[in-house]
Image (tube, rainbow, N blue to C red):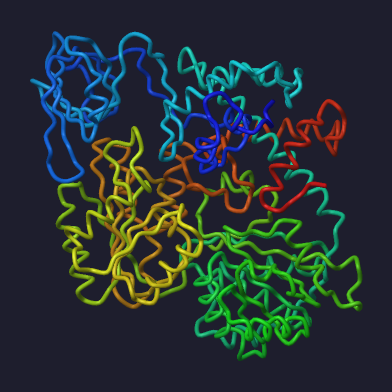
Amino acid sequence: MLDTDIRYSKGIGEKRAALYAKLGIATVGGLLYHLPRGYIDLSAPYGVLDAPIDENCAVKARLMRKSPEQRIRDGLSVFKLRAEDPSGVLNITMFNSKYTVDHLDLDREYIFYGRVSGGFTGREMNSPAIYPINGTERIVPIYPTTAGLSSNMIRFHIKSALAALPELPDPIPADIREKYALMGRKESLRNVHFPEDLQQAVCARERFVFEELLTLCCGLSILRAGSKIRRAAVIAPVDMRPFYGCLPFAPTNAQLRAIADIIGDLGGGLPMNRLIQGDVGSGKTLVAAAAIYCCFKNGRQSALMAPTEILAEQHFATLSEFLEPLGVRVGLLTGSVKAAEKRRVKDAIASGEIDLAIGTHALLSQGVEFPRLALAVTDEQHRFGVNQRAKLSAQGLSPEIPDDSRDVHVMVMSATPIPRTLSLIVYGDLQLSVIDELPPGRKSIDTFAVGGDKRKRALAFVRKALDEGRQAYIICPLIEKGETDTGLRPAKEYAQLLSKTELKGYKISLLHGKMKAAEKEEVMRAFSQGQLQALVSTTVVEVGVDVPNATIILIENAERFGLSQLHQLRGRVGRGTEKSYCILISDSKGETAKGRLDMMKRTGDGFALAEYDLKARGPGDFFGQRQHGLPELKIASLSDNLDTMKKAKQCADEILIEDPQLCSPKYTMLGEMVRELMGRVGTSPN
């Protein structure tokens, strides 16, 4: 039943199935596991004058007046509504909502949900969600949506699918559910989508969070157990003095410690799987260069894979400068390299003439053969899985390399500062080295936090920098406007607005995660080459391209980001010789948001920011949308669900003592889920 094509679910069909495909949903199971991203609580609506200012809340009032449609300009119409209760008046503004307004009845009570503004005598709301008093659930789920699929429509389809669902087998056996106080699978599906109260929704979601984290913990434990029986080339320690002598600056003590960790791993005979975690600008690439040099002196090749061609080219330039004076032959292989050059580079890799191959996923393409590959270096977005390492290491190995030394050493670089209290859980399958100091001379970035009333002044400051030949990033939290994300600036609409107003006449473009890879590459290349002056983007630029000429980053709705994410975004500037600036715009009046943005102004230390966020909010969003090389989790968060992660790890350890490979009938379904989850990043526990 869960594997049934979503086209055959009631009310969906071919056209809507194509829309669901945009959300990554292809089956009935995928639909049912498309969990709400939040809930609107309508169970205890406020009276008009009791409603808290500058917060999203539900207000019950009687609709007394509807004004005629007012056309402001092409494509934009406004409706003014007036609702009342005994305490006061609620004035409502609706944009482009003719259908909704036409279906509202005068002298009828509704619940209006949105952000409230106003004073002592009245309240105001812009574009609230409107619910009739009767026939509406008290707890309304809000789903991730796409154009053509509203949250209400998704809710209707899920309700139909649940009604047709038979009894479901449960991947978590009954004794484990009882021990960890978990709901059954079908009960959880019903209560997570249609809860009677928020506590019921929390308990149902907790079951699915536990299920996903249990699956992850089992997969990582099986992988770790398998790594202990694999062998890799022994890379003997070498004299590093020539390497250090060629550097334009002395390494920091933190870099030297990380290099020592790596050299110890490389000489141990087991495959290295080490994370080098360092703040923006801490010099992780130099550490990678040292590891590559060590392998080179042992007669072995290295590969470095980057997520984009621009980043691959930047790594090529930097590492060539570090290593070519020492005799290391460096080659670049990306998708856009011309055919003749591509053949030459592939031939040079296969013959061993290239000691370090740098590229994108083109390094994994057919015809790329590494006869003496020992080390794979990747960034946090593209950590090699077991199958990818096997693919690299199996390509044209020289007969002189013993079979038991064929696995590849892996080094992962991450620029996301994570509190040490979280690191062991988050990166449980990796050894960890932390670079916790910056090279001397790194310029600080002046950071300002301002309200929306200073936006015009901030954009004037951006224009001044552009007029002086500099470039700027403008970051938005959303790609496009959602149903309930009132007050947030979506990148698509903002880019259009700026091109007609404050940045009219400047060369600006849009970048977001739903664009095709080639489109994103083209935009970033144009920006890095100075063909664009300003880039309006979502957090897709959080980790990535190095544009020394970009000196300003302006971040809208800054309160919506975790401090570590803001710090990553700030790290996009300050990479050249010019003074750089970060402007955080937020209209939030809350003390928590104010304290966090003040912390951003006070320090440029990413680890201090991460620790502050941990203490202030609990395990906050240290990861944004990515899980840094681990399988992308659809429900759980490795940071927000830290306590559940600990329980899931304990449970996984107990299960694997009983059944190390999850082969028994009791754990067959769990084993299948483990293989599916780990397969998302090209790894397999078997």
Observer-nearest of 65 and 417: 65
Looking at the rendered structure, the number of numbered marks drawn on it comes to 0
Observer-nearest of 438 and 81: 81
x, y (%) of residue 566? Answer: 39, 52
522 to the left or right of 354: left
312 to the left or right of 70: right
Q: Check the image and report above or below for 397 versus 271.
A: below
x, y (%) of residue 411? Answer: 66, 64
Residue at position x 70%, y 36% in the image: 215
Residue at position x 50%, y 55% in the image: 416
609 to the left or right of 646: left
Observer-nearest of 597 and 547: 547
Farthest front residue in view = 14
Quarter of the rendering containing residue 501 = bottom left
- Does residue 474 appear in the picture of this structure? yes
Quarter of the rendering containing residue 386 = bottom right
Residue at position x 77%, y 76% in the image: 370
337 to the left or right of 504: right
Quarter of the rendering containing residue 13 = top right
- Does residue 580 appear in the picture of this structure? no
x, y (%) of residue 224? Answer: 77, 49
Observer-nearest of 399 and 404: 399
Q: Quadrant of the N terminus?
A: top right
